[in-house]
Amino acid sequence: MKTYHIITIGCQMNVSDSERVANYLENLGYSWTDDKNNSSVVITTTCGVRQSAENRVYSLIPDIKKINPACKVVLTGCLSDRPDVQRRLKDDVDIWMPITQLETLAEKLGEEMPKFPDSGSLGGYLKIQPKYQSTFSAFVPIGNGCNNFCTYCVVPYARGRETYRDAMEIVDEAKALVEKGYKEITLIAQNVNSYKSHNAQRITHNEINFPKLLRMVNDIPGDFWLRFTTSNPKDMGDELIDAIAESEKACKYIHLPVQSGDNEILAKMNRHYTREHYLDLITKIRNKLNVDNGVWEPKVLITTDVIVGFPGETREQFENTLSLFEEAKFDMAYIGQYSPRYGTPAAKMKDDVSLEEKAQREKDLTVVLRKTSLDNNRDYMGHVVDVLFDHKKGGYYFGRTRTSRKVRMKSEDDLIGQIKKIKITGFGDFGLEGEAEK
Protein backbone atom coordinates (compact mmCIF):
# COMPACT_ATOMS: atom_id res chain seq x y z
CA MET A 1 0.00 0.00 0.00
CA LYS A 2 1.36 3.43 -0.99
CA THR A 3 1.16 5.97 1.84
CA TYR A 4 2.11 9.61 2.34
CA HIS A 5 2.71 11.93 5.28
CA ILE A 6 2.98 15.73 5.10
CA ILE A 7 4.79 18.01 7.56
CA THR A 8 3.82 21.67 7.20
CA ILE A 9 5.94 24.46 8.66
CA GLY A 10 5.04 28.14 8.39
CA CYS A 11 2.24 30.32 7.08
CA GLN A 12 -1.31 29.80 5.84
CA MET A 13 -0.01 29.65 2.27
CA ASN A 14 2.08 26.63 3.20
CA VAL A 15 -0.97 25.00 4.77
CA SER A 16 -2.91 25.56 1.56
CA ASP A 17 -0.01 24.25 -0.54
CA SER A 18 0.13 21.09 1.56
CA GLU A 19 -3.60 20.57 0.99
CA ARG A 20 -2.98 20.58 -2.76
CA VAL A 21 -0.04 18.19 -2.40
CA ALA A 22 -2.31 15.82 -0.44
CA ASN A 23 -4.95 15.72 -3.15
CA TYR A 24 -2.31 15.33 -5.85
CA LEU A 25 -0.85 12.28 -4.09
CA GLU A 26 -4.27 10.75 -3.53
CA ASN A 27 -4.87 11.06 -7.28
CA LEU A 28 -1.72 8.93 -7.64
CA GLY A 29 -3.21 6.25 -5.38
CA TYR A 30 -1.45 7.19 -2.13
CA SER A 31 -3.27 7.12 1.22
CA TRP A 32 -2.63 9.39 4.20
CA THR A 33 -0.86 8.00 7.26
CA ASP A 34 -0.17 9.63 10.62
CA ASP A 35 3.03 7.62 10.93
CA LYS A 36 5.85 9.36 9.08
CA ASN A 37 8.25 6.62 10.14
CA ASN A 38 6.36 4.03 8.10
CA SER A 39 5.24 6.17 5.17
CA SER A 40 6.17 5.55 1.53
CA VAL A 41 6.54 9.29 0.87
CA VAL A 42 7.18 12.09 3.37
CA ILE A 43 6.70 15.66 2.15
CA THR A 44 7.95 18.63 4.15
CA THR A 45 6.52 22.02 3.19
CA THR A 46 9.22 24.33 4.50
CA CYS A 47 9.39 27.93 5.69
CA GLY A 48 12.51 30.08 5.42
CA VAL A 49 11.18 33.29 6.93
CA ARG A 50 12.91 32.75 10.29
CA GLN A 51 15.95 30.75 11.33
CA SER A 52 13.90 28.84 13.90
CA ALA A 53 11.65 27.47 11.14
CA GLU A 54 14.68 26.52 9.06
CA ASN A 55 16.30 24.77 12.02
CA ARG A 56 13.24 22.54 12.42
CA VAL A 57 13.88 21.15 8.95
CA TYR A 58 17.50 20.34 9.80
CA SER A 59 16.41 18.31 12.82
CA LEU A 60 13.33 16.64 11.30
CA ILE A 61 14.50 15.37 7.93
CA PRO A 62 17.69 13.49 8.91
CA ASP A 63 15.74 11.69 11.65
CA ILE A 64 13.03 10.65 9.17
CA LYS A 65 15.56 9.23 6.75
CA LYS A 66 17.46 7.48 9.53
CA ILE A 67 14.37 5.75 10.93
CA ASN A 68 12.65 5.18 7.57
CA PRO A 69 15.43 4.90 4.94
CA ALA A 70 13.11 3.31 2.35
CA CYS A 71 10.79 6.32 2.15
CA LYS A 72 11.02 9.01 -0.50
CA VAL A 73 11.67 12.34 1.24
CA VAL A 74 10.33 15.34 -0.70
CA LEU A 75 11.24 18.89 0.30
CA THR A 76 9.11 21.73 -1.02
CA GLY A 77 8.29 25.26 0.13
CA CYS A 78 10.61 28.21 0.74
CA LEU A 79 13.81 26.18 1.21
CA SER A 80 13.48 23.94 -1.83
CA ASP A 81 15.68 26.07 -4.13
CA ARG A 82 18.30 27.08 -1.56
CA PRO A 83 21.77 25.76 -2.59
CA ASP A 84 23.03 25.82 1.01
CA VAL A 85 20.05 23.78 2.22
CA GLN A 86 20.50 21.34 -0.65
CA ARG A 87 24.15 20.84 0.28
CA ARG A 88 23.33 20.33 3.94
CA LEU A 89 20.53 17.80 3.32
CA LYS A 90 21.83 16.19 0.12
CA ASP A 91 22.00 12.72 1.73
CA ASP A 92 18.53 12.93 3.31
CA VAL A 93 16.27 14.46 0.62
CA ASP A 94 15.33 12.44 -2.47
CA ILE A 95 13.28 15.06 -4.34
CA TRP A 96 13.65 18.85 -4.28
CA MET A 97 10.45 20.44 -5.55
CA PRO A 98 9.47 24.13 -5.64
CA ILE A 99 5.71 24.13 -5.04
CA THR A 100 5.06 25.66 -8.47
CA GLN A 101 6.44 22.42 -9.92
CA LEU A 102 3.94 20.21 -8.09
CA GLU A 103 2.65 18.82 -11.37
CA THR A 104 6.05 17.18 -11.95
CA LEU A 105 6.00 15.19 -8.72
CA ALA A 106 4.42 12.11 -10.31
CA GLU A 107 7.25 11.75 -12.78
CA LYS A 108 9.83 12.23 -10.01
CA LEU A 109 8.15 9.46 -8.01
CA GLY A 110 8.02 7.20 -11.05
CA GLU A 111 4.23 7.39 -11.26
CA GLU A 112 1.88 8.01 -14.17
CA MET A 113 0.95 11.68 -14.45
CA PRO A 114 -2.57 12.49 -13.17
CA LYS A 115 -4.84 14.63 -15.31
CA PHE A 116 -5.60 18.13 -14.05
CA PRO A 117 -7.07 21.26 -15.68
CA ASP A 118 -5.03 23.36 -18.08
CA SER A 119 -2.15 24.87 -16.16
CA GLY A 120 -2.71 28.53 -17.08
CA SER A 121 -0.50 31.37 -15.84
CA LEU A 122 0.42 29.81 -12.51
CA GLY A 123 2.12 26.68 -13.81
CA GLY A 124 -1.00 24.79 -12.81
CA TYR A 125 -0.42 24.04 -9.18
CA LEU A 126 -3.11 26.36 -7.79
CA LYS A 127 -5.65 24.79 -10.14
CA ILE A 128 -5.18 21.45 -8.40
CA GLN A 129 -8.12 20.83 -6.07
CA PRO A 130 -6.95 20.82 -2.43
CA LYS A 131 -7.82 18.23 0.17
CA TYR A 132 -9.09 20.69 2.78
CA GLN A 133 -8.01 19.92 6.34
CA SER A 134 -11.17 21.46 7.78
CA THR A 135 -14.82 20.88 6.96
CA PHE A 136 -15.89 24.38 7.99
CA SER A 137 -12.98 26.81 7.41
CA ALA A 138 -10.88 27.01 4.25
CA PHE A 139 -7.94 28.97 2.85
CA VAL A 140 -8.45 30.04 -0.76
CA PRO A 141 -5.18 31.23 -2.34
CA ILE A 142 -5.62 34.02 -4.87
CA GLY A 143 -2.04 34.06 -6.09
CA ASN A 144 1.57 33.28 -5.39
CA GLY A 145 4.86 35.16 -5.10
CA CYS A 146 5.85 38.70 -4.20
CA ASN A 147 7.24 41.74 -6.04
CA ASN A 148 8.15 43.81 -2.99
CA PHE A 149 11.71 42.58 -2.30
CA CYS A 150 11.88 43.71 1.31
CA THR A 151 15.58 43.48 2.11
CA TYR A 152 15.15 40.91 4.90
CA CYS A 153 12.67 38.60 3.14
CA VAL A 154 13.26 35.39 1.15
CA VAL A 155 9.76 35.10 -0.31
CA PRO A 156 10.41 36.73 -3.73
CA TYR A 157 13.40 34.44 -4.19
CA ALA A 158 11.66 31.33 -2.87
CA ARG A 159 8.29 31.79 -4.60
CA GLY A 160 9.11 34.11 -7.49
CA ARG A 161 7.30 37.18 -8.76
CA GLU A 162 3.60 37.75 -8.22
CA THR A 163 1.18 35.73 -10.34
CA TYR A 164 -2.57 35.70 -9.72
CA ARG A 165 -5.51 33.45 -10.41
CA ASP A 166 -8.46 34.39 -12.56
CA ALA A 167 -11.09 36.14 -10.45
CA MET A 168 -13.90 33.81 -11.45
CA GLU A 169 -11.74 30.77 -10.67
CA ILE A 170 -11.35 32.14 -7.13
CA VAL A 171 -15.06 32.94 -6.84
CA ASP A 172 -15.98 29.47 -8.11
CA GLU A 173 -13.75 27.79 -5.49
CA ALA A 174 -15.22 29.92 -2.70
CA LYS A 175 -18.77 29.34 -3.95
CA ALA A 176 -18.27 25.57 -4.02
CA LEU A 177 -17.04 25.69 -0.42
CA VAL A 178 -20.03 27.75 0.74
CA GLU A 179 -22.39 25.31 -1.00
CA LYS A 180 -20.75 22.50 0.98
CA GLY A 181 -21.51 24.32 4.22
CA TYR A 182 -18.19 26.03 4.94
CA LYS A 183 -18.63 28.83 7.44
CA GLU A 184 -15.38 30.71 6.91
CA ILE A 185 -13.44 31.59 3.75
CA THR A 186 -9.99 33.20 4.00
CA LEU A 187 -8.42 34.68 0.86
CA ILE A 188 -4.64 34.37 1.07
CA ALA A 189 -1.50 35.43 -0.79
CA GLN A 190 1.92 36.78 0.14
CA ASN A 191 0.57 40.27 -0.52
CA VAL A 192 -3.15 39.78 -0.91
CA ASN A 193 -4.14 43.38 -1.55
CA SER A 194 -1.85 43.77 -4.57
CA TYR A 195 -4.10 41.31 -6.44
CA LYS A 196 -4.80 42.08 -10.09
CA SER A 197 -6.59 39.82 -12.57
CA HIS A 198 -6.65 40.43 -16.32
CA ASN A 199 -8.41 37.19 -17.21
CA ALA A 200 -11.94 37.45 -15.83
CA GLN A 201 -13.59 37.19 -19.27
CA ARG A 202 -16.88 36.00 -17.83
CA ILE A 203 -17.41 39.38 -16.18
CA THR A 204 -15.43 42.10 -17.92
CA HIS A 205 -12.24 42.65 -19.83
CA ASN A 206 -11.22 45.30 -17.31
CA GLU A 207 -8.73 44.61 -14.56
CA ILE A 208 -10.11 43.36 -11.26
CA ASN A 209 -8.22 44.51 -8.18
CA PHE A 210 -8.48 43.15 -4.65
CA PRO A 211 -11.30 45.43 -3.42
CA LYS A 212 -13.41 44.33 -6.40
CA LEU A 213 -12.51 40.67 -5.79
CA LEU A 214 -13.50 41.01 -2.12
CA ARG A 215 -16.89 42.36 -3.14
CA MET A 216 -17.35 39.53 -5.65
CA VAL A 217 -16.72 36.86 -3.01
CA ASN A 218 -18.92 38.75 -0.55
CA ASP A 219 -21.78 38.55 -3.07
CA ILE A 220 -21.74 34.73 -3.10
CA PRO A 221 -25.11 33.59 -1.71
CA GLY A 222 -24.90 32.01 1.72
CA ASP A 223 -24.09 32.70 5.34
CA PHE A 224 -20.31 32.75 5.85
CA TRP A 225 -17.48 34.84 7.23
CA LEU A 226 -14.95 36.33 4.80
CA ARG A 227 -11.36 37.03 5.84
CA PHE A 228 -8.09 37.83 4.05
CA THR A 229 -4.38 37.92 4.81
CA THR A 230 -1.68 39.23 4.49
CA SER A 231 -1.70 42.93 3.52
CA ASN A 232 1.09 45.37 2.80
CA PRO A 233 0.48 48.89 4.15
CA LYS A 234 1.60 50.42 0.85
CA ASP A 235 -1.37 48.73 -0.86
CA MET A 236 -4.00 49.37 1.81
CA GLY A 237 -5.97 52.21 0.22
CA ASP A 238 -9.33 53.87 0.73
CA GLU A 239 -10.98 51.63 -1.89
CA LEU A 240 -10.14 48.49 0.09
CA ILE A 241 -11.13 50.00 3.45
CA ASP A 242 -14.49 50.99 1.90
CA ALA A 243 -14.94 47.50 0.45
CA ILE A 244 -14.41 45.91 3.88
CA ALA A 245 -16.84 48.34 5.49
CA GLU A 246 -19.51 47.78 2.83
CA SER A 247 -19.20 43.97 2.54
CA GLU A 248 -21.46 42.44 5.18
CA LYS A 249 -19.61 39.09 5.21
CA ALA A 250 -16.15 40.66 5.52
CA CYS A 251 -14.83 40.32 9.06
CA LYS A 252 -13.57 43.40 10.84
CA TYR A 253 -10.09 41.97 11.23
CA ILE A 254 -7.02 43.49 9.56
CA HIS A 255 -3.52 42.01 9.70
CA LEU A 256 -1.21 44.86 8.68
CA PRO A 257 2.53 44.16 9.17
CA VAL A 258 4.45 47.28 10.16
CA GLN A 259 7.92 45.66 10.70
CA SER A 260 9.35 48.85 12.25
CA GLY A 261 8.21 52.18 13.64
CA ASP A 262 11.30 54.05 12.50
CA ASN A 263 11.43 55.66 9.06
CA GLU A 264 15.15 55.09 8.52
CA ILE A 265 14.81 51.39 9.33
CA LEU A 266 11.71 51.13 7.13
CA ALA A 267 13.72 52.59 4.25
CA LYS A 268 16.55 50.08 4.87
CA MET A 269 13.90 47.34 4.83
CA ASN A 270 12.58 48.65 1.47
CA ARG A 271 9.04 48.86 2.83
CA HIS A 272 7.84 51.86 0.75
CA TYR A 273 5.83 53.61 3.47
CA THR A 274 6.55 55.73 6.52
CA ARG A 275 5.59 55.56 10.15
CA GLU A 276 3.24 58.50 9.59
CA HIS A 277 1.52 56.80 6.65
CA TYR A 278 1.06 53.61 8.66
CA LEU A 279 -0.48 55.37 11.66
CA ASP A 280 -2.75 57.35 9.33
CA LEU A 281 -3.98 54.02 7.90
CA ILE A 282 -4.75 52.72 11.39
CA THR A 283 -6.82 55.84 12.07
CA LYS A 284 -8.67 55.53 8.74
CA ILE A 285 -9.44 51.86 9.34
CA ARG A 286 -10.83 52.49 12.83
CA ASN A 287 -12.82 55.55 11.75
CA LYS A 288 -14.39 53.67 8.85
CA LEU A 289 -15.03 50.28 10.47
CA ASN A 290 -15.96 51.31 14.01
CA VAL A 291 -19.43 52.76 13.41
CA ASP A 292 -21.35 54.12 16.40
CA ASN A 293 -25.02 53.41 15.68
CA GLY A 294 -26.13 53.34 19.31
CA VAL A 295 -25.81 49.55 19.56
CA TRP A 296 -22.66 47.85 20.86
CA GLU A 297 -20.63 46.16 18.14
CA PRO A 298 -17.11 44.68 18.32
CA LYS A 299 -14.44 47.10 17.20
CA VAL A 300 -12.10 46.24 14.35
CA LEU A 301 -9.23 44.01 15.45
CA ILE A 302 -5.80 45.01 14.12
CA THR A 303 -2.73 42.79 14.29
CA THR A 304 0.78 43.26 12.97
CA ASP A 305 4.23 41.79 12.38
CA VAL A 306 7.39 43.47 13.59
CA ILE A 307 11.11 42.73 13.47
CA VAL A 308 13.38 43.75 16.33
CA GLY A 309 17.14 44.04 16.00
CA PHE A 310 17.31 44.72 12.27
CA PRO A 311 20.92 45.50 11.23
CA GLY A 312 21.89 48.94 12.44
CA GLU A 313 18.77 49.44 14.57
CA THR A 314 19.76 51.69 17.46
CA ARG A 315 17.97 51.78 20.80
CA GLU A 316 16.48 55.15 19.82
CA GLN A 317 15.14 53.71 16.57
CA PHE A 318 13.65 50.78 18.44
CA GLU A 319 11.94 53.19 20.82
CA ASN A 320 10.16 54.66 17.78
CA THR A 321 8.69 51.20 17.24
CA LEU A 322 7.79 51.04 20.92
CA SER A 323 5.95 54.37 20.73
CA LEU A 324 4.17 53.24 17.55
CA PHE A 325 2.87 50.22 19.48
CA GLU A 326 1.60 52.54 22.21
CA GLU A 327 -0.16 54.73 19.65
CA ALA A 328 -1.53 51.97 17.38
CA LYS A 329 -2.88 49.91 20.31
CA PHE A 330 -2.59 46.55 18.54
CA ASP A 331 -4.67 43.56 19.55
CA MET A 332 -1.89 41.12 18.69
CA ALA A 333 1.61 41.29 17.22
CA TYR A 334 3.93 38.63 15.92
CA ILE A 335 7.33 39.83 17.09
CA GLY A 336 10.37 38.33 15.40
CA GLN A 337 13.99 38.74 16.37
CA TYR A 338 15.95 39.50 13.20
CA SER A 339 17.95 36.63 11.72
CA PRO A 340 19.82 36.89 8.38
CA ARG A 341 18.07 35.12 5.51
CA TYR A 342 20.23 33.50 2.85
CA GLY A 343 20.42 35.46 -0.40
CA THR A 344 18.71 38.62 0.84
CA PRO A 345 20.30 42.10 0.76
CA ALA A 346 20.00 42.38 4.54
CA ALA A 347 22.15 39.26 4.95
CA LYS A 348 25.05 41.35 3.63
CA MET A 349 24.51 43.96 6.35
CA LYS A 350 26.29 43.64 9.69
CA ASP A 351 24.02 41.84 12.17
CA ASP A 352 25.18 44.14 14.96
CA VAL A 353 22.37 43.91 17.54
CA SER A 354 23.19 41.29 20.16
CA LEU A 355 20.89 38.34 20.84
CA GLU A 356 20.44 39.63 24.38
CA GLU A 357 19.35 43.05 23.12
CA LYS A 358 16.98 41.53 20.56
CA ALA A 359 15.37 39.46 23.32
CA GLN A 360 15.03 42.54 25.54
CA ARG A 361 13.40 44.54 22.75
CA GLU A 362 10.92 41.72 22.17
CA LYS A 363 10.07 41.75 25.88
CA ASP A 364 9.63 45.54 25.87
CA LEU A 365 7.17 45.37 22.96
CA THR A 366 5.31 42.49 24.58
CA VAL A 367 4.71 44.56 27.72
CA VAL A 368 2.99 47.29 25.66
CA LEU A 369 1.12 44.71 23.58
CA ARG A 370 -0.27 42.92 26.63
CA LYS A 371 -1.61 46.17 28.01
CA THR A 372 -3.30 47.36 24.80
CA SER A 373 -4.74 43.91 24.08
CA LEU A 374 -6.09 43.67 27.64
CA ASP A 375 -7.72 47.09 27.31
CA ASN A 376 -9.28 46.12 23.98
CA ASN A 377 -10.56 42.79 25.33
CA ARG A 378 -12.17 44.52 28.32
CA ASP A 379 -14.65 46.13 25.91
CA TYR A 380 -16.21 42.68 25.28
CA MET A 381 -17.14 42.01 28.90
CA GLY A 382 -20.82 41.12 29.31
CA HIS A 383 -21.61 41.29 25.60
CA VAL A 384 -22.88 38.48 23.36
CA VAL A 385 -20.86 37.65 20.26
CA ASP A 386 -20.82 34.98 17.56
CA VAL A 387 -17.98 32.48 17.94
CA LEU A 388 -16.82 29.84 15.44
CA PHE A 389 -15.32 26.96 17.44
CA ASP A 390 -12.42 25.15 15.79
CA HIS A 391 -10.80 22.85 18.39
CA LYS A 392 -10.95 21.37 21.88
CA LYS A 393 -8.10 21.08 24.36
CA GLY A 394 -7.87 20.36 28.07
CA GLY A 395 -11.63 20.29 28.60
CA TYR A 396 -12.18 23.65 26.84
CA TYR A 397 -13.55 24.49 23.42
CA PHE A 398 -11.65 27.21 21.60
CA GLY A 399 -12.92 29.48 18.86
CA ARG A 400 -12.75 32.95 17.37
CA THR A 401 -15.16 35.84 17.04
CA ARG A 402 -15.82 37.50 13.70
CA THR A 403 -13.07 39.94 14.68
CA SER A 404 -10.75 36.96 15.33
CA ARG A 405 -10.56 37.32 19.10
CA LYS A 406 -9.87 34.01 20.79
CA VAL A 407 -12.59 32.64 23.06
CA ARG A 408 -12.61 29.57 25.28
CA MET A 409 -15.49 27.95 27.13
CA LYS A 410 -16.61 24.65 28.61
CA SER A 411 -19.54 22.78 27.13
CA GLU A 412 -21.10 19.33 27.21
CA ASP A 413 -22.06 19.72 23.53
CA ASP A 414 -19.82 19.16 20.52
CA LEU A 415 -19.09 22.69 19.29
CA ILE A 416 -16.42 22.03 16.64
CA GLY A 417 -17.32 23.72 13.37
CA GLN A 418 -20.31 25.54 14.80
CA ILE A 419 -21.05 29.24 15.22
CA LYS A 420 -22.67 29.92 18.59
CA LYS A 421 -23.81 33.04 20.41
CA ILE A 422 -21.56 33.35 23.44
CA LYS A 423 -21.75 35.75 26.36
CA ILE A 424 -18.32 37.00 27.40
CA THR A 425 -17.82 36.42 31.12
CA GLY A 426 -14.09 37.05 31.47
CA PHE A 427 -11.06 38.38 29.64
CA GLY A 428 -7.28 38.29 29.69
CA ASP A 429 -4.58 39.99 27.70
CA PHE A 430 -4.81 37.63 24.72
CA GLY A 431 -8.18 35.93 25.08
CA LEU A 432 -11.79 35.90 26.26
CA GLU A 433 -13.83 33.53 28.42
CA GLY A 434 -17.45 32.80 27.63
CA GLU A 435 -20.58 30.81 28.23
CA ALA A 436 -23.50 29.87 26.01
CA GLU A 437 -26.13 32.60 25.82
CA LYS A 438 -29.14 31.67 27.94
Image (cartoon, rainbow, N blue to C red):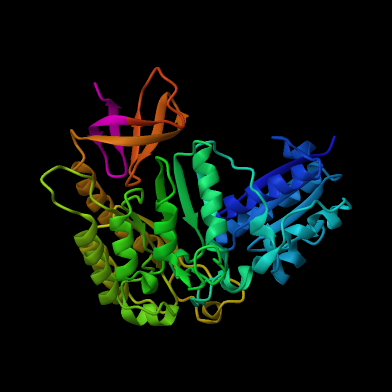
Span shown in magenta: 421-438
* Residue 10 image offset from top left, x and y in percent: 55, 54
Q: Residue at x 19, y 36 (%)?
A: 381
Residue 356 in view? no
Residue 82 in view? yes
In the figure, 264 relative to 119: above or below? Answer: below
Question: In the rendered view, does 136 fall on the left or right side of 6?
Answer: left
In the figure, 311 relative to 232: above or below? Answer: below
Viewer-nearest residue: 197 or 291: 197
Viewer-nearest residue: 308 or 176: 176
Which quarter of the rendering shows the N terminus? top right
Is residue 123 found inside the magenta-colored segment of the image? no
* Residue 272 image offset from top left, x and y in percent: 39, 80
Viewer-nearest residue: 118 or 357: 118
In the figure, 14 relative to 191: above or below? Answer: above
Question: In the rendered view, does 385 fall on the left or right side of 160?
Answer: left
* Residue 97 image offset from top left, x and y in percent: 74, 61
Question: In the rendered view, does 315 fall on the left or right side of 283?
Answer: right
Which quarter of the rendering shows the C terminus? top left
Question: In the rendered view, does 34 fall on the left or right side of 227?
Answer: right
